[in-house]
Amino acid sequence: MKNGMKMAAIYARVSTEDQARDGRTSIDVQHAACESEVARRGWKLMVGEYDDPGASGGTLERPGLQRLLRDCRLGLVNAVVVSKIDRVARDEIVRLLLIREFQQMGIDFVALDVPGDYQSAEGELLSGLLGNVAAFERKKIVQRTVEGQRAKAKRGDWPGGTAPYGYSLTGTGPTARPVIDEAEADMLRRATSMVVDQGLSTGEACRVLNGLGLRPRHARAWEHQNLRRVLSSQTLLGRVSWAKSERPHGQGHHTRRLPDGSNKYGATLDLQLPPILDLGRFTAL
């Protein structure tokens, strides 16, 4: 404390960049409400950058939150104020871990949507209910998003996400569709020719491609493993599987399995894009 006055920090979070621009949940709106509460309590506002725009509330690994916890541990912050209980965390376990740590450090925690003293039995009960509601809302948002993506995929439209290697998206938002990326497709056809027509190994083909300045999308150079993976994929035939239960090497529009073993996206859907290679060429490859 400075001169016996509590130093209060405001923590604000929005889960996506779109919400960051929403006047109802924006960082500025959260700050305005919290600043009024800090002034009402006679606390001094701690000047610090503790905001997390576009951050998930289901994890502790948020830059602004980690800065806040650091300053709390250093004794620079004596109170934490949030506009809503779900701003600090939507996931109930994450939220309880945070609140418990604040309590152990002697930090006053104030959520404006929890009336009265948070430490009271009533406050703890209400915060638990609000946290559960927030977690339920989050799951429903994911469910609605998945349902919309599946509906698009069933119509033959692109369900969302980045296009696989060899393709790029044309259009934006719901109208975005993958089309052949001529530069990447030309590179794939060159690599195919090196392997099929010249008899090069994928390692040798990598050295030629790198020497020509032809690079992968997200790496500095081609290596045997990633070139072999790309050339072995039926994406070259325009066949893309959406909602697979595994995600090999971080590729494709796949998802992790849920704790009960199910796939939250449901059954795999096969999409057909314009092929980069014909079947005969792919078979030879």
Image (tube, helix red, strand yellow):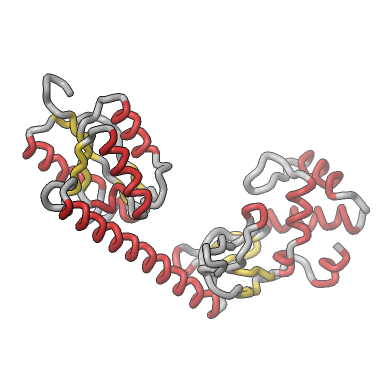
Give the residue drawn at x 91%, y 57%: 197
180 left or right of 193? left
Rendered position, 134 above or below 29:
below
Rendered position, 243 above or below 62:
below
Residue furthest to the top: 3
In this view, the residue in front, 135 or 282, is 135
168 left or right of 86? right
177 left or right of 38? right
Q: Position of residue 209 (x, y in %)?
A: 78, 45
Q: Quadrant of the N terminus?
A: top left
Q: Position of residue 48 (x, y in %)?
A: 27, 31
- Count of all numbered marks drawn on residues in the image: 0
In this view, the residue in front, 18 or 108, is 108
Q: Position of residue 57 (x, y in %)?
A: 36, 51
Give the residue drawn at x 16%, y 43%: 34
Q: Quadrant of the C terminus?
A: bottom right
In this view, the residue in front, 199 or 48, is 48
Residue furthest to the front: 121
Give the residue drawn at x 63%, y 74%: 270
Give the residue drawn at x 7%, y 33%: 42
In this view, the residue in front, 210 or 95, is 95
Q: Position of residue 70 (x, y in %)?
A: 35, 30
Task: Find residue 190 and report its image quarter.
Answer: bottom right
Rendered position, 209 above or below 252:
above
Task: Find residue 66 and report its image quarter.
Answer: top left
Task: Find residue 231 and report its image quarter.
Answer: bottom right
